[in-house]
Amino acid sequence: MRRILYLLIVLIMIGCSSLPKHRKSDLLLQADRYFKSAQQAERQLLREQALYLYDQAYSTYSRIDHLKGKIHSGIGISRQYHYLGQEKDHQLWADKISLYIDTEKPQYSPLLELMFIEIAFSRDDYDQVLLLSRAFRSDDLEWNCENLCYGIYARIKQKQTYYNEKTELQNRIELLAKLYNKGKLRDPVNYSYALYTLGYISRFEGTLDEAASYFDKAKMIDIELENSVGLADDLYALGKCYQEKSDPDLAKSYFSRAYEIYLLIGDEETALRLYDMISE
């Protein structure tokens, strides 16, 4: 009898101790869902919605003390505040996440640096982009490719040579493709962005067929990812390629599709520019 009673007590204790683990697992799944939904909202320029979802992800990661998740979602929060014009809150969150990284997770420092590079790029501060890009250090494939892309754009804008960066990005695009096809990229948008960047370079160099090929590949990826911002940019770029190839009808077809998406995501400035081009 005692043995049976002891066995029951042990089983109850084991069951009780496993409940927190199950709860923790459920909360982690919930936090991950919030984070992925935030990324999707951001791809559609739904900044307020993205901010809310990143905040929900951060709060849920905090409940299970998941520091990696807190860093990723906290950076997302900081980024949304910047684009919403709330610079004080943007800096507050950047400082908060920087403290986490400095004291507990220094390996995530490049992720915060990439946000600052992106923000400098959004402000057309290409000197700052190049300064931060040159100082960037990471062994992570996706982070390196994103940094290369920003650096290449800034170099072209500043009329500086970009051959080494272009070669490095070309050498890494196949690995990105393999990881994408296996579903192993953390953020698949990095692959479409790299393809778009190579297309941008090719168009800048006047190799329009090669540029169109890169833009078309980026377009297919962005369709799969439901990346509205990327897709609109891809279509716009394809339109420019065919405009320069003296195929106005195909160019207008791409411009029209891009125009519709820019309107949907609220980029009225680009939509208006495209409307004028379509109406010519």
Image (cartoon, rainbow, N blue to C red):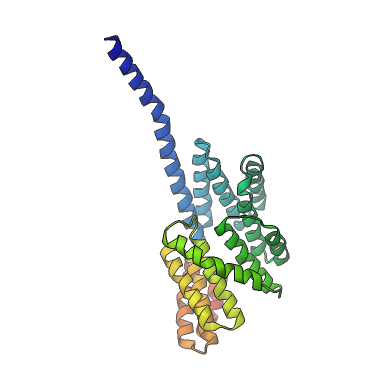
- Residue 259: x %, y % from top left: 49, 74
Residue 212 in sight here: yes
Q: Position of residue 83 (x, y in %)?
A: 60, 58
Q: Residue furthest top?
A: 2
Q: Is residue 49 left or right of residue 129?
A: left
**What residue is shown at x 64% (from left), y 69% (from top)?**
165
Q: Observer-nearest residue: 164 or 16?
A: 164
Residue at left 52%, top 67%?
173
Identify whether 80 is placed above or below 260.
above
Depth check, front residue: 262 or 165: 165
Residue 7, located in which quarter of the rendered image? top left
- Residue at x-position 53% and y-position 73%: 271
Q: Position of residue 198 (x, y in %)?
A: 56, 73
Quadrant of the image occupied by residue 22? top left
Q: Is residue 258 above or below residue 93?
A: below
Q: Is residue 36 left or right of residue 94?
A: left
On screen, 261 above or below 180?
A: below
Is residue 113 placed above or below 249 in the rendered structure? above
